[in-house]
Amino acid sequence: MENSRLSAKIDQFAWVFNSYVGEIEAATLGAHEQTHRKILYFSVLEALAQTRYPKRGPQKACASFVVKYSNWKDGERVSLPHLVAALERTDDPRFEEPRNVAYRRLNKWGTGGPLRIDRDPGKTEVQKLWPKNSSGTSLEIPGLGFDWKALQHRRLLYAYRSKLSHESRQPTASSENPSDRFPIYEDLGEPEKPEWHLVYPVGFLADLCRTGIQNLKAWLVSEARNPYEQFLFGRFLIEKLNDSEVQVRHPFVLTWQC
């Protein structure tokens, strides 16, 4: 009986989130519906990621989830235009080799587009070229405070989400078609100086959600996990106040005064 109750909860969880995706896809959201639809899809992805990784921060949880459970293998790739932009901002000779390789590679793109992100270098390729300290850890770019891992698509996707969710704007000027299902670059610069704008299309985000729901459900079944136990439900907006493991030491009791 216990197994059947757990199975019912998992089925209900998957059904609810699949219905969210369907409703988002079908909703009429006005003149800026593409932006609004993306924000809603990101809220679904974050909820799924937190279900799987409740002890991680939202950014790390989402970056892991989209690769492992949404099956986004290109999420591990390093965005070449972002890599070049980062390496343009340092003259540290230790970054000379990755800079030369990145510049030559981006030069081969020419101009125009759109181009899919499967042209971007894989993480192993960049990791091998990247300078390291004596302990073998990748060096951060001076003045920027990050290394190549910050330029992976699984990290950039969350930065894209933050611009949409917190500023209600598309982070880049690239356009997209309703039928687009893969992230793309589009060159919007001058002929002598290309500017590659990255866009994660709305249909691509919908696919991440659907695949993520399917694979998360399979994980919940295999691990016999109740998805609702990953969250602290309660009336308080600060989650610690809903945590039964945090002891109430001085309970409030209403006293009537005459």
Image (cartoon, rainbow, N blue to C red):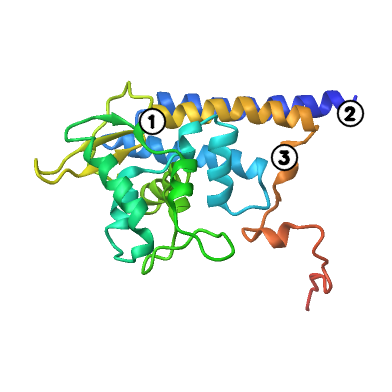
Amino acid beneath label 3? Tyr
In 3D space, how far apart are the residues under numbered discs 3 and 1 (Cα atoms)?
A: 36 Å
* Residue 168 in view: no
In 3D space, how far apart are the residues under numbered discs 1 and 2 (Cα atoms)?
A: 45 Å
> Going from the N terminus, do you reach mark 1 or mark 2 first?
2
257 sits to left or right of 150: right
Tell whether label 1 touches label 3 (CB within 8 Å).
no
For the residue pair 191 and 94, the one nearer the viewer reads as 94
Query: Where residue 113 appears, x then y in whole percent?
Result: 21, 30
Amino acid beneath label 2? Glu
Residue at 78% x, 25% y: name it: 7
For the residue pair 248 and 57, the one nearer the viewer reads as 57
Residue at 59% x, 54% y: name it: 57
**Is 225 drawn above or below residue 102 in the view shown?**
above
Give the mark count.
3
* Residue 177 in view: yes
Quarter location, residue 181: top left
**Is 79 drawn above or below residue 98 in the view shown?**
above
7 sits to left or right of 91: right
- Which residue is disc 3 drawn over? 228
> Going from the N terminus, do you reach mark 3 or mark 2 first?
2
Q: Locate the C terminus and report the quarter of the image it occupies.
A: bottom right
Determine whether the residue tagged by mark 2 lies in a helix, strand or loop.
helix
Determine whether the residue tagged by mark 3 lies in a helix, strand or loop.
helix
> What mark, if any, has residue 118 been given in the picture?
1
Number of the front mark, 1 or 2: 1
> What mark, if any, has residue 257 been given in the picture?
none
Number of the front mark, 3 or 1: 1
Quarter location, residue 26: top left
Disc 2: CA contacts within 10 A as few (<14), some (14-19) or many (>=20)? few
- Which residue is disc 2 drawn over? 2
